[in-house]
Amino acid sequence: WESLTNIGLIRLVLKHWKFTLSEIYHGLTAHLYLKTVKPYMPSLTINDIETATNPPPPSGVRAQALSPSGDLIHDFVFDVSEDKNIIHVRNAPSPAATASLQIAKEITAMASSSFGLSSK
């Protein structure tokens, strides 16, 4: 319930209500989904699509950071807790593995400056 009443989610849905309704409809209606993807895969048939009558696939939902204004946050968020010497890295999307060395350098620099560590 907490997710559905989140002010950021409510604002996102209101900003993009047509897209929201389209996504819900596509998720519930295999025939409409087929019509949408058919231009990309002309040989696809309704039998190729898993529906509620077949074992349903995982939903495909992934976590995405959202601002209170309803905007998607497309980059990493670093939170530094100086009193506990902790750095939290939030919203690390799938390119995180590719960028992991650069992220490590940034975290190291943050830890050095925030916690008074030496960079040996």
Image: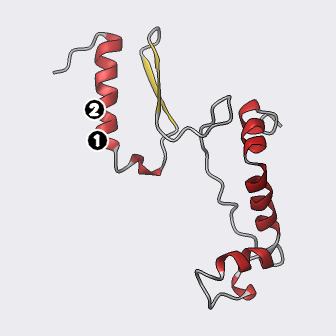
Which image quarter holds the C terminus? top left
Question: In whole angstroms, how far apart are the C-alphas of marks 1 and 2?
Answer: 6 Å
Label 1 Cα neighbours within 10 Å, binned few <14 / some 14-19 / many ≥20 = few
Q: Amino acid at mark 1?
A: Leu
Q: Position of residue 119 (x, y in %)?
A: 20, 20
Q: Is residue 30 above or below residue 28?
A: below
Q: Is residue 60 above or below residue 107?
A: below
For residue 36, the mark is none
Q: Amino acid at mark 2?
A: Lys
Q: Position of residue 67 (x, y in %)?
A: 63, 31
Residue for badge 2: 105
Which residue is rendered at x = 78% and y = 42% of the image?
Answer: 14
Q: Position of residue 74 (x, y in %)?
A: 51, 41
Q: Quadrant of residue 80?
A: top left
Q: Nearer the viewer, residue 68 or 60?
A: 68
Which residue is rendered at x = 77% and y = 54% of the image?
Answer: 18
Which image quarter holds the N terminus? top right
Discs 1, 2 touching: Cβ within 8 Å: yes
Q: Position of residue 8 (x, y in %)?
A: 71, 33
Asked if residue 117 lies left or right of residue 11, the reply is: left
- Total marks shown come to 2
Label 2 Cα neighbours within 10 Å, binned few <14 / some 14-19 / many ≥20 = few
Q: Quadrant of residue 68?
A: top right
Residue for badge 1: 101
Q: Is residue 22 above or below residue 75?
A: below
Q: Quadrant of residue 82?
A: top left
Q: Is residue 37 above or below residue 24?
A: below
